Each structure stands twice: as structure tokens, then as C-alpha cells.
Image (cartoon, rainbow, N blue to C red):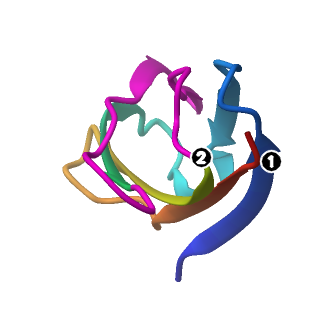
Amino acid sequence: MAIQANVKQSSLECLIYPIDWTLALLSGVTVTGVTITHTPPSGSAASFGDDIATPITYIESPKGLVTGNHYVSIVATTSNAALCPEVYLIIAVDR
């Protein structure tokens, strides 16, 4: 089951979104990586940064996103090779 969050951002901002995987992790299991997929309203996908610190992953959105809704899918891989539920950010860029 995916978790969805709707957020707002200016094209002039570079924001960091914390993703807490605590409820998806079994005892002793850690996050080893994340896959980020960005679908912009137009143009090319941007590169989003990540900083993995179990149980929280920090996703950094770049400056200069075009106006419109950006869809960002984040899926974590764990130390027991499982995948955490998808986190789906919808970033509304207004200028």
C-alpha cells in the first residue's frame, strides 16, 4: 500500500523531505538504499538527492522545478532484501 503526501514548493527552493520507514521495518532491519522516480509535468525528470539514515531517509528536491505537479515515487530497499511500501510525493510547484 502506497503512502501519499501532497506538498507545495517554489521553483526557487531546494527542500528536504524526511521519509520515516519505522513502521515498515522489522526489528534489526535497516534501509540500505532508495529508488527515486520523478515524473515532471513537462520536460525532463530532475535528479533528486537522498541521504539514507535508518529509519529516516532524507529526499532533497532540486531548485528550478517547472511549474505544475511533480510526482515522486520513493521505494526503500532493506538489509533483508525486502522493499518498503512506496511513498508517493506530489509536489505542487507554483512559480
Q: Secondary structure at mark 2?
A: loop
- The percent position of residue 66, horizontal first and vertical second, equals 52, 43
Q: Nearer the viewer, residue 93 or 48?
A: 93
The disc label shown at residue 8, or none: 1
Task: Please tell me which residue is depicted at 42% across the width and 59% down the height of the picture.
Answer: 84
Magenta span includes 63: yes
Q: Quadrant of the C terminus?
A: top right
Is the C-beta separation of discs 2 and 1 under 8 Å?
Answer: no
Specify the quadrant of the image occupied by residue 42. Answer: bottom left
The disc label shown at residue 18, or none: none
**How many marks overall?**
2
If you read the primary sequence from the N terminus, does the residue marked by circle 2 or circle 1 appear first?
1
Q: Nearer the viewer, residue 34 or 65?
A: 65
Q: Secondary structure at mark 1?
A: strand
Q: Nearer the viewer, residue 95 or 39?
A: 95
10 Å crowding of disc 1: few (<14), some (14-19), many (20+): few
Amino acid type, residue under disc 2 in the picture = Trp
Read off the magenta span.
40-66
- The percent position of residue 85, horizontal first and vertical second, equals 47, 67
The disc label shown at residue 21, or none: 2
2 or 1: mark nearer the eye: 1
